[in-house]
Amino acid sequence: MATKKGVEVSIGIGDAVKLANADVVAAYPITPQTHIVEHLAELVAEGELDAAFIPVESEHSAMSACLGSAATGARTFTATAGQGLELMHEVLYVASAMRLPIVMAVANRALSAPLSVWGDHSDVMAVRDTGWIQIFTENGQEVIDNVLCAFRVAEDRQVLLPVMIHLDGFHLSHMIETILFPEQSEVDQFLPPNQYPFPLDPSKPVTMGDFSPPVLYTEARWAQEVNLRASKEVVLQVWKEFGAKFGRNYSPVECYKCENRKVLLLTMGSFTETAMTAIDELEKQGRTDVGLVHLRLWRPFPFEELRQAVKDADVLIVLDRALSYGGPGGPVCSEVKSALYNLKKKPKVVSFVGGMGGRDITVAGFETIVNRGIEIAQKGSEQEFEIFGVRE
Amino acid sequence: MANKKPDKKTEAEMTWKDLEVGLIATEPGSARQYKTGAWRSQRPTYEFSKCIKCGLCSIFCPEGCISQNEQGCFEADMYYCKGCGICDKECPTRVITMVEEEE
């Protein structure tokens, strides 16, 4: 039997990591991730979680400590946000290339300057190509469920890759929600002990992150790429098993009232729930041709699932919460466009950027985006994208 | 060197499938197989009759590639020697002369 608790999502993450029996937590506190790390430090200090808590002096060190920890075969967790994720940047590539199964929660935050502690996806998009599996979450329950799934995926012998769980800073991290926590015995059944195949051991020495001359580097990179793409099958399998066991099902691309709808909105993260309400409101107003696509799995990118979800639509409106300065506008939209480019029949894709630095997009805001998006699709636009809600 | 197969292929023969997970090297000391003496522009030549076998060149060699040969004289291993010339500078009896690499 699951326990139902009203809890702040960040505290819930700490509890989920405890349920996962993590061995090592190495993290540096940063808003809006702080409560996750504080709660884990508390759980370790109180003896409720039998783990080593490594209080490092920076995020670069946090991820470096995670490398060492994961390489010993210890179940390893960390969390960060915004500038902290960027300070980790170079080490993120090392974690994925060395194939170390680290799980990290990222409380998505805008980047400086100007200084902003509030949420958007600028931090995620900057680490898009670091080779990590990346999952976006919509609500507190989804965060907790996916933290548990992330350990299963990361430590799978066929995968051995680090996983990021993205949750919107404040909009999710500081929200108090009713969350179902599975029993310890159920989690233990779902998540067997970590069996990392090359644990650091003086009696059986290995070299990790070895020197690779030009004659091998391309092969090493391709092996990593093939592996990351193939990890999607394991993600699907783990979600399926999780659904069968706990009754909550997840998919890489989720459709909300998409069937036979000619206009689709695409969102990621917590804004998806507001967008759902907007779709319902539009329906009440007689706009029964609008649906919603939620992109949950960001890496590996779910090409087939996305194409399937949007193939019959005429217009696809993509909302990004980050800017690619001087480029195509929204990074998600540019990836969606490239995923659809070679299809014979495809929707017109319209790009919006909004919700940056913690600015809300309300239900009415999404209705405006949909109506403006339809207008742009019909009349065309000379701009690569439109920025929603900017005062001009 | 991260070949997981027991039947060792050369680096140039290895495909991505032959690489160990994460390019982990499971054989200790396998970096010795890398030929790191390939980019020399000068090489040491020896007049061993002058060698007093003091070993100073071996101590100063930043590559650690100088050891005693069959006569007990100190000589660089050309598989690793980068041709820096430090051995020549340090040798008290001027055994070594650096010459341009022909190839």
Image: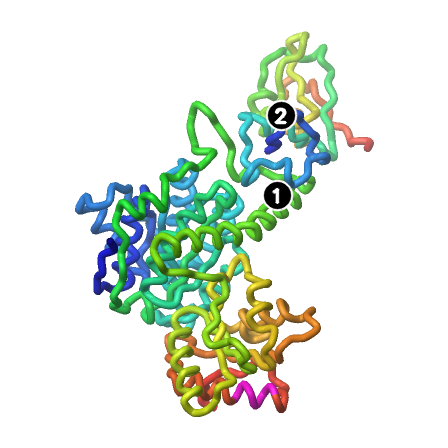
Q: Is residue A112 visible?
A: no
- Where is residue A301 shown, x and y percent of the image? 55, 61
Chain that bears disc 2: B
In the rendered image, which residue does mark 2 sit on?
Answer: B6
Q: Main secondary structure of the magenta part?
A: helix
Q: How is the image coloured?
A: rainbow
Pick the front one: A7 or A258: A258
Instruction: Say above or below: A13 vs A383.
Output: above
Pick the front one: A262 or B98: A262
Q: As shown in the figure, which amino acid type bears the numbered disc 1? A: Ala
- Where is residue B73 shown, x and y percent of the image? 66, 12
Left or right, A363 with respect to B88, comes to left
Magenta-colored span: A372-377
- Where is residue A308 shown, x and y percent of the image? 58, 68
Judge depth for marks 2 and 1 and give the one in front. 2
In the rendered image, which residue does mark 1 sit on?
Answer: A220
